Image (spheres, rainbow, N blue to C red):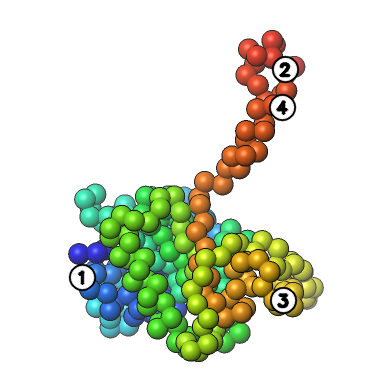
Amino acid sequence: MLRILVTNDDGIEALGIKRLVEALLVLDQAEIFVVAPDEEKSGVGHGVTYRTPLATEKRDFYGLPVKAWAVNGNPADCVKAAYHLLFAAEEKPDIVFSGINVGTNLGRDIYYSGTCSGAREAVILGVPGVALSYDNWYDQENYGDVVQMIAPLVKDFAERAGKGELAPEVFWNINIPHVPLAQVKGIVPATLSLHHYEDKYSEAAEGYFLMREYPQVMPIAEPYDYDLVKHDYIAVTPVHIDATDRSLLKQMDGWPLMQPWEKQGEQPDE
């Protein structure tokens, strides 16, 4: 039996998480657990709750045959709490799916995204994690053909997880274009597009709101996730949770200051 944990950052009552569970329910021999925030937690990054207690509430989940709980915390809280409180030591989840997010999580969005944090927290705990986002920010009630689009992906990832074939310390960030299934050009590997928008602040009576300005979509020159999604590809990015720049680390061996004190002859002035 494959144990699948599902979370999100739009809240347990969001339509996107329902669509994700619908795509997972067709899998053979899968037991699905939903543990998600009791309210929207978009943009919370990888925040976890320390100073207030977490409370869980068992929920009916759209009448679907899954076990579900709402948590008064962030997506990372949901995954962490589920891992430690819901599953026995010998029955940990085989994979965590987080989403389907309203709107994309592309490029540096992965650092702000609660959806991505759900998948990242799974990997921190030693469980494969997959984040899914859909480019419907301006059409939020319309999930179109997304179930059919992600069905082969979630099946493939779930089967690979069951066989232990997914790389450790990597979560998978999937972004899906908001087009009919027939217009999808393919499922392709993608790199993060770190500079595809600019932050701007818009003044209002009560203060300032953070806004984003996006560039005109150009022909694809590099396999960036933003460009691929805007050209109707499903973009899949493996994101390693070890952010150490190892090539730079090696260069730092030659920095005079970066030496053990005994090699420098004396300690620096305090």
Looking at the image, is mark 3 or mark 4 earlier in the sequence?
3
- Please give the label number shown on residue 255: 4
Viewer-side label of 3, 1: 3
Disc 3/disc 1 C-alpha distance (Å): 44 Å
> Most extreme residue toward the front, as rendered?
221
Q: Which residue corresponds to mark 3?
A: 218
Q: Residue at x 40, y 83 (%)?
A: 148
Residue 180 in the image: x percent, y percent? 50, 89
Q: Residue at x 62, y 78 (%)?
A: 230
- Residue type for callout 3: Met
Task: Determine crowd level at label 3: few under 14, some 14-19, many 20+ residues with C-alpha closer than 10 A.
Answer: few
Q: Which residue corresponds to mark 2?
A: 268
193 to 150, vertically: above or below: above
Secondary structure type for disc 2: loop
Q: Quadrant of the N terminus?
A: bottom left
Viewer-side label of 3, 4: 3
Task: Determine crowd level at label 4: few under 14, some 14-19, many 20+ residues with C-alpha closer than 10 A.
Answer: few
Viewer-side label of 2, 3: 3
Res 158 visible:
yes
Looking at the image, is mark 1 or mark 2 earlier in the sequence?
1
- Residue type for callout 2: Pro
